[in-house]
Amino acid sequence: MEATVRGTFRMLPFFDYCRQTYEQVFRIPAPAEDPWEIGHGGSRRSFFRLGQPPRSLVGMLSDTPPADNRGITENDSFLYIALCLSQAGAPVPRVFAADRARGWFVMEDVGETLLYHEVQRLGRGLAIKALYRLAVDDLVWMHVKASPGFDSSRTHNPDYRRDFVRRHESGYFQQAFLQDILQWDPVPLSLDLDRLADAVDTLWTPHFLYRDFQSQNIAVQGSRLRYLDFQGGRRGPRQYDLASLVYDPYVVLDAELQAYLVDRYVERARALEPGFDGKRFRADFPIVAVHRLMQALGAYGYLTRTAGKSYFYQFIPGGVHLLGRLLGQYPELETFPVLAETIRRLVREVGWKL
């Protein structure tokens, strides 16, 4: 009880900040009750709702993250990318007030119904196909319209290139998943993963890369989709974002829908961007898709074992299943033989059995 009181007292200035913003936005007195906490998944940030829709706001409390050598933090990245995407016409929540130094943000409330929830509710029918088609259309728009004005130097996020990939994606997979969760020796994979990371630099493009474009970061708001958790945006190959959506362990889409969504992306990109090379886009797709799945499995391992968030353990089998499917769909991944055999072993020994 005492700890709860101390925690609430510490939150009072933030709650007052939310109330002041509420009154400025809606021009009515703020609700007397304190904002209440809502879900935050794997995020280190906390979210609070004040008021009831349609007159409600969401406050985000972000611990002050470390600054890079230029003094830029994740909070700076969040604000800059929110502005960049908004100016490009992407449907991201409006930010009404921000105190970056204290990690206080007050934003538009886009609800708590995520694409992930809609798949659980509606199944895999035509309604879900329509939502995913809309997500792909919005993604193409972001890639085409936000990329020209996006200045990655105003974020703390390095470009999606070889060294970043090797450390934060395939290296993450080796350490946090293979070693920490499965107690497998990750060393034999290293040469293949070095070569796979080398390939990233050969297909790199200077597009805006959302980097976490998946069903738990997409809110369904009536007939619209709204996009969340974009502070990790950087420059890189845009196939990665499509792979994040269609090879999403939270929602294991069937292979037919996956193929349809890749086709849809290529169709819309050709319509919006003269000169778009659909053949090259498809050829490079498996290299970034396998990295995305390794990143996801590394994240689930870290969140489960290190962060104590066992909720994410349930998504490991889906990620392994998708790795196996990807290997079957793209025989060129067999040119990384140790990785290919590791994937087959994962499917045999882990798969849907965890």
Image: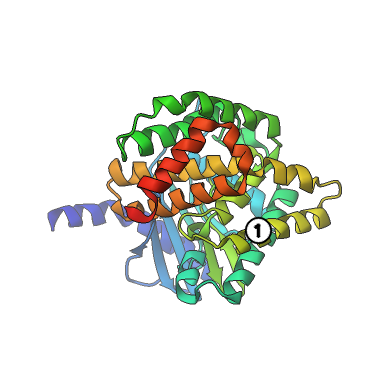
Secondary structure of residue under mark 1: helix
Outermost right residue? 274
Q: Is residue 336 above or below residue 109?
A: above
89 vs 288, nearest the viewer: 288
Q: Is residue 236 left or right of residue 278?
A: left
Residue drawn at 46 percent across, 45 percent down? 296
106 vs 319, nearest the viewer: 319
Task: Count the labels in the image.
Answer: 1
At which x and y percent is residue 242? 62, 51
The residue that mark 1 highlights is 259
**How is this picture coloured?**
rainbow
Q: Is residue 24 above or below residue 223?
A: above
43 vs 125, nearest the viewer: 125
Q: Amino acid at mark 1?
A: Ala
At which x and y percent is residue 315? 39, 54
Residue drawn at 50 percent across, 47 percent down? 323
Q: State the image quarter where residue 177 is shown.
A: top left
Inspect this view and state whether residue 73 appears: no
